[in-house]
Amino acid sequence: MSTALMTSVTGFVGGEVNVREVGEQRVASFSVAVNRKTRSGEQQTLWMRVNCWNKLADVAHSYLKSGSLVQIQASWMRASAYIDREGNPQASLDITADRLV
């Protein structure tokens, strides 16, 4: 028996798409903001880092710009931690995209 994780994220691209070479493959990375309002009316934003590989990296680089609305379908994600510019610990959700809509 196998297991699976499928997720769909819809949000706004938070900056330019960065493309780099990793060995013989290309990867495009960009951030996506997903917003919601709490019961008290306060807006919360969850930032995610999205990685697209090879042909999907080319699509992301060609079509996505800062502020673009995008839907990402993915079969893998992981949590990570980092230190921001002010020295505060932060968490991030990293997603490997399978499809962009």
Image: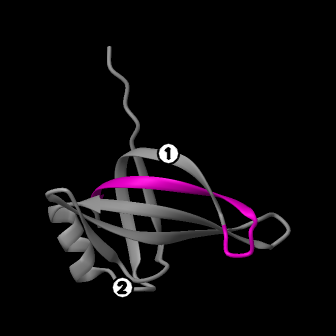
Q: Point out the image quarter for the C terminus.
A: bottom left
Kind of residue sitting beneath label 2: Lys
Q: Is residue 98 above or below residue 65?
A: above
Q: Quadrant of residue 39?
A: bottom right
Q: Which residue appears at 48% of the width and 70% of the height?
A: 32
Q: Is residue 78 above or below residue 60?
A: above
Q: Secondary structure at mark 2?
A: loop
The percent position of residue 15, horizontal first and vertical second, equals: 46, 82
Nearer to us: label 1 or label 2 = 1
Kind of residue sitting beneath label 1: Arg
Q: Which residue is mark 2?
A: 65
Q: Which residue is mark 1?
A: 78
The percent position of residue 35, horizontal first and vertical second, equals: 62, 70
The answer to if 95 sits in the magenta stretch is yes
* Residue farthest toward the right in the current orientation of the protein: 40
Q: Secondary structure at mark 1?
A: strand
- Earlier in the chain: of badge 1 and badge 2, it is 2
Q: Which residue appears at 54% of the width and 54% of the height?
A: 93
Q: What's the distance in space between the residues labelled 1 and 2, CA to CA?
A: 24 Å
**Image-based side of 69 in relation to 63, left or right:** right
Magenta segment, which residues? Answer: 84-99
Q: Is residue 69 above or below residue 81?
A: below
* Residue farthest toward the top in the current orientation of the protein: 1
Q: Quadrant of residue 62?
A: bottom left
Q: Is residue 83 above or below residue 42?
A: above
How would you classify the magenta stretch by its main secondary structure? strand
Q: Quadrant of residue 54?
A: bottom left
